Image: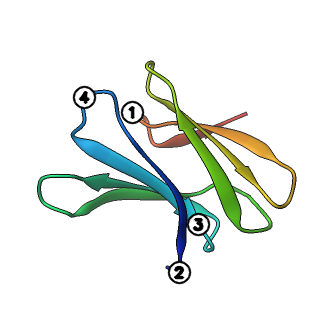
Amino acid sequence: SGPVHAAAFTKDGLKLATVGKDQSLREWNVTTGDMTFAVDQRHNAEVWGLALSTKGMAVTGGWDRKVLQTDLAGHKLQG
């Protein structure tokens, strides 16, 4: 938990992805407000950048100078 630094909607607009101080990527159901999953992305510092691809991937960047990619459909960190 903690402050959210970036958020992005999935292309269908039904889910919202967030990143922030806790270094994790979270996905939320926009209709219910429920968190559908959270994944520890192996960032070592706050995460400030988030972009979603049309192919269901999330790319995040943090103060640790890492750029990480996560498959939102499979809820798995890539690489």
Q: Which scheme is used to colour this image of the protein?
A: rainbow
The earlier-in-sequence mark between 3 and 1 is 3
Residue found at the very far left of the displayed protein:
31
The total number of labels drawn is 4
Position of residue 5 measured from the top left corner of the image (x, y, whole percent): 57, 64
Within 10 Å of the Cα at label 2, are there few (<14), some (14-19), or many (20+) other Cα atoms?
A: few
Residue at mark 4:
12
Q: Is residue 6 above or below residue 56?
A: below
Query: Which three-letter amino acid code belongs to the residue tagged 4?
Result: Asp
| SS under mark 2 | loop
Q: CA distance from mark 3 to mark 1?
A: 21 Å
Query: Which three-letter amino acid code belongs to the residue tagged 2?
Result: Gly
Quadrant into which the C terminus falls: top right
| Discs 3, 2 touching: Cβ within 8 Å | yes
Position of residue 51 measured from the top left corner of the image (x, y, whole percent): 56, 37
Query: Which three-letter amino acid code belongs to the residue tagged 1?
Result: Ala
The circle drawn on residue 2 is 2
Residue at mark 3:
20
Within 10 Å of the Cα at label 4, are there few (<14), some (14-19), or many (20+) other Cα atoms?
A: few
Query: Which three-letter amino acid code belongs to the residue tagged 3?
Result: Gly
| SS under mark 4 | loop
The earlier-in-sequence mark between 4 and 1 is 4
Marks 3, 1: nearer the viewer: 3
Q: Is residue 43 left or right of residue 10?
A: right
| Discs 4, 2 touching: Cβ within 8 Å | no
Marks 4, 1: nearer the viewer: 4
The circle drawn on residue 73 is 1
